[in-house]
């Protein structure tokens, strides 16, 4: 297993990208997930990735409050559509109607934080990934660009 000691990210190991454990707050809990820094073997981690992580890590409490509200707003928009897709037997279990963001806690499970490459664009892109009850195959993501929620949707918006 290849390892890297990075000045910003700390102790990383290579598993289809540089990874290590990471903790952030969500819905009043501290969540432990895998931090992923996509990078080809032998390639350098981009400075934009380091900067994105430093800023995200410094502001993670405020940013995750934005994510919670954005996730709730997204869920409110898609709930009825998914309820009709999964059918009457499963809709109350997989996509129940909810009244506040805290009720999302039982419907999503945080899995990873991805510090995306900028590919020369200069943007700081961080993806927060989840498994979710209503879209178990594709999952859910919040995409931050320059510390603003740019999009909430399936994980393909980040990966």
Image (spheres, rainbow, N blue to C red):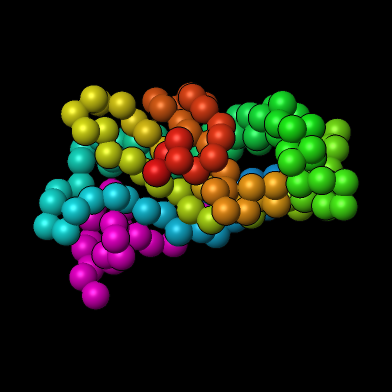
- Rendering coords of residue 62 (x, y %): 57, 32
In the rendered view, tell whether residue 49 sits above or below residue 150: below
Q: Quadrant of residue 79?
A: top right
Q: Nearer the viewer, residue 80 or 41?
A: 80
Q: Is residue 55 visible?
A: yes
Q: Main secondary structure of the magenta part?
A: strand
In the image, taking residue 21 as reference, residue 117 lies left or right, namely left
Q: Residue furthest bottom?
A: 1
Q: Nearer the viewer, residue 157 or 17?
A: 157
In the image, taking residue 22 as reference, residue 26 lies left or right, namely right
Q: What residue sits 13% from the left and 51% below the top?
A: 43
Q: Is residue 62 visible?
A: no
In the rendered view, tell whether residue 133 sits above or below residue 51: below
Q: Is residue 148 magenta?
A: no
Q: What residue sits 21% from the left and 38% below the top?
A: 47
In the image, taking residue 95 as reference, residue 145 lies left or right, namely left
Chain part drawn in magenta: 1-23
Q: Nearer the viewer, residue 59 or 146?
A: 146
In the rendered view, tell whether residue 11 sits above or below residue 148: below
- Rendering coords of residue 102 (x, y %): 77, 42
């Amino acid at each position: 297993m290849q390892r890297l000691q990075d000045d910003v990210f700390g102790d990383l190991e290579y598993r289809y990208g540089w990874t290590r454990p990471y903790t952030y707050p969500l819905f009043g809990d501290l969540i432990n997930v895998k931090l992923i820094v996509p990078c080809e073997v032998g390639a350098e981690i981009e400075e934009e990735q380091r900067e994105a992580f430093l800023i995200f890590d410094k502001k993670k409490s405020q940013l995750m409050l934005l994510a919670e509200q954005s996730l709730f707003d997204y869920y409110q928009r898609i709930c009825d559509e998914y309820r009709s897709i999964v059918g009457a037997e499963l809709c109350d279990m997989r996509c129940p109607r909810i009244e506040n963001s805290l009720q999302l806690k039982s419907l999503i499970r945080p899995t990873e934080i991805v510090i995306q490459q900028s590919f020369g664009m200069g943007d700081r892109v961080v993806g927060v990934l989840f498994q979710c009850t209503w879209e178990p195959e594709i999952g859910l993501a919040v995409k931050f660009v320059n510390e603003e929620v740019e999009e909430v949707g399936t994980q393909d918006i980040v990966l």
